[in-house]
Amino acid sequence: MGIFLALRILYGLALAASCTFAFRHGGRSERHGAAIILVGSLLTVLVEGLPAFDWRYSRQGLVAVDLGVLVAYFVLAQRSNRFWPLWTTAFQLIAVMTHLVIMVEPRRVLQAYAIAQGFWAYPMLASIVIGSIGSRRLARS
């Protein structure tokens, strides 16, 4: 099993667990945040699965998906009374910036770019879970 396949499986498990937790125990903001990352992740898989996709050349689809996710989290942060959406917006902004770095310096190692793209999803998932735990505590009090 290659490293990228192992990372995809790990991310899929973390995504499923985090989103399930948010949908079951989170409030409205947490459910919206989980839906955003779930849709963004599915769209990323679809874009990467296109026959013309090549990490070396075509990243416009990934940039579009990541920008859409960034906008969605920004809107959520503006409308939510919770703090964690600001975290996910910041993490997603960093992920979008990695696209810009590779566009400015395309000769950089593409594996590092691919790993950096996926890395920022984990803190986003963690912030959704943390927000869900906080929402659950607020509902109890």
Image (cartoon, grey):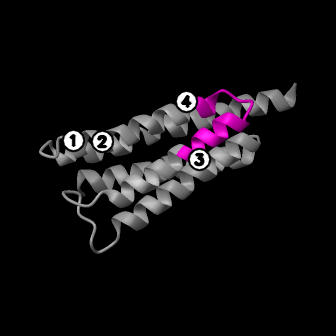
- Residue drawn where x is 49% and y is 61% of the image: 42
The magenta span reads 71-86
For discs 4 and 2, the disc positioned in front in the rendered view: 2
Mark drawn on residue 87: 4
**Can you identify the residue that label 3 sits on?**
72
Q: CA distance from mark 1 to mark 2?
A: 6 Å
Residue 138 appears in which quarter of the rendering?
top right
Residue depth check, mark 3 versus mark 1: number of the one nearer the observer:
1
Q: Evaluate if marks 1 and 4 touch, with contact meaning CB atoms under 8 Å apart.
A: no
First reached walking from the N terminus: tag 1 or tag 4: 4
Pointer 1 with pointer 2, Cβ within 8 A: yes
Tell me which numbered mark, 3 or 1, is placed earlier along the sequence.
3
- Sequence-first disc among 3 and 4: 3
- Secondary structure under tag 3 reads helix
For the point 23% across and 43% down, the residue is: 102
Earlier along the polypeptide chain: callout 4 or callout 2? 4
Marks 2 and 3 sit apart, C-alpha to C-alpha, by 19 Å
The x, y position of residue 103, in whole percent, is: 24, 46
Left or right: 117 as drawn, with respect to 87: left
